[in-house]
Amino acid sequence: MTDTSASDQSAVQPERAFVSDLFHAVSQPLTALECGLELSLRRDQSAAEFRARVETALVNAKLLHRRLLEARALQDASEPGDTHAPVDLKGLVRQLHEDLLPVATSAQIKLDVKCEAATVHGNEARLRNGLFYLIEFLLRVSGSGQRVSIRAQRVSLTALEVSFRNSSPARIETPDSTPVAEPADLGLRIAQRTFRAAGGELVFTQNRTGQVAGYVRLLLAD
Amino acid sequence: MRILVVEDDAPLASFLRQGLEAEYYAVDIAPDGDDARWMALENDYDLIVLDLNLPKMDGIAVLHAIRPKKPSLPVLVLTGRSRIEDRVESLDSGADDCLIKPFSYTELSARVRALMRRRPLTAETLLKIEDLELDRIERTVKRAGKRIELTSKEFGLLEYLLRNAGHRITRSMIVEHVWNLSFDTGTNIVDVYINYLRKKVDEGYSPKLIHTVRGVGYELRSRREVAA
């Protein structure tokens, strides 16, 4: 009886957390929107005041819209999608490297990517999105002159790790902080859920100087 | 220009009608899939805005019913389903573009304009504006007869801009169509690529073709269209 109850509890836990996060995300802009609209209906105001209130309401409506899109993107990332075909990781990483190289070059960041030939479990489009958001995040938090290194290699018979770090050209050190359970950055959170949905995981640390390191573990399919 | 809006949610349908009529389109409303199929096949529309979740017959079935008889009629699908697979299913069923709810009217309006005058993709291998040419089969680009080397993504971005030449393209549209990303986290990748493309396509040439539209995105525009 207790076991069943505990299992039921763990099954609804992610749903509760999602609803709680969603409520938190939308409550502020929704309140501001409602109050703004109520105030805009008051009669004792000029046309300019009325217009200003409507403009503020529009800003809050757009913020609410954005929060809902973010919540849905996170929920979507938690779904594995069609995973029947194994994914050629090397091809995927090579294409992403080419696509994101202009972003790195324009920010004067050295993007160094190496991936050994391997096929992994997952949905190709979703893994591409996850890796895109991860690499784009690494480029965004890295400064001019820094190097972003990404290495994908087998670590066991069943798993492959995509390790990543950013560092200044002068020294390479491991960030001294503990792993971040729920990153604040939306792109990184989407990436984390995407890899989790594919049976893998993303472990990530960031210290106060902005240095980032971590790895994505994926299940091998070959 | 006549548009059929297929939407069962009456307030949303009314809001779309008001917005599109304010832009001088003639608008008909179909509240369910059966009516939509009949109206689309019986009347001549320039574009259909089609909600997927409909009573009597869903939007995908409507698309399957009208596509064989009206292959070049532009269809913009509206959907509350945001998964990559749902978007792919819509496009595979014959939709020309897919807009995920909730959306802003500005985004819908930009997509309607882009679809309205888009040249049929299948018929054209050579896309051209002023002295800029893109050959979709040979995968080559020339400006003033001089060959320009582009990466695959730069080529894809330029092709998308050329297909929508003369129309404002939002960053979301570019992120979805060129990068196939379902959600724009605010990355600057589009701006970076546009800058690269400008250096290759516009620098040293006249007139400049790639224009920034403040607060919206970008537009590929010829000198004649600027004058107009």
Image (cartoon, rainbow, N blue to C red):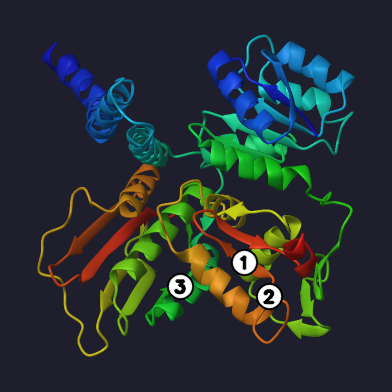
Percent across and percent down for residue B48 are: 74, 30
Picture quadrant of residue B71: top right
Residue A23 picture location, percent across and down: 25, 28
The chain to which mark 3 is attached is A
Label 1 to label 3: alpha-carbon separation: 20 Å
Q: Amino acid at mark 3?
A: Val
> Which quarter of the figure is the C terminus of chain B placed in?
bottom right
Q: Which residue is mark 3?
A: A103
Label 1 sits on residue: B211
Label for residue B208?
2
- Say whether mark 3 and mark 2 are on the same chain: no
- Look at discs 1 and 3 and give the one toward the viewer: 1
Assign a secondary structure to mark 1: strand
Disc 1 sits on a residue from what chain?
B
Residue occupying the point 29% across, 20% down? A42
Label 2 – label 3 distance at C-alpha: 23 Å
Q: Quadrant of residue A53?
A: top left
The answer to whether any part of residue A81 appears in the image is yes
Q: Chain of mark 2?
A: B
Label pair 2/1, CB-CB below 8 angstroms = yes
On screen, residue A99 above or below A36? below
| Residue B172's disc number | none
Q: Amino acid at mark 1?
A: His
* Front disc: 2 or 3: 2
**Location of residue B57 with respect to B204 vertically, above or below:** above
Label 3 crowd bin: few (<14), some (14–19), many (20+), radius 10 Å = many
Residue at the bottom extreme? Answer: A170
Q: Residue at x 29, y 68 (%)?
A: A141
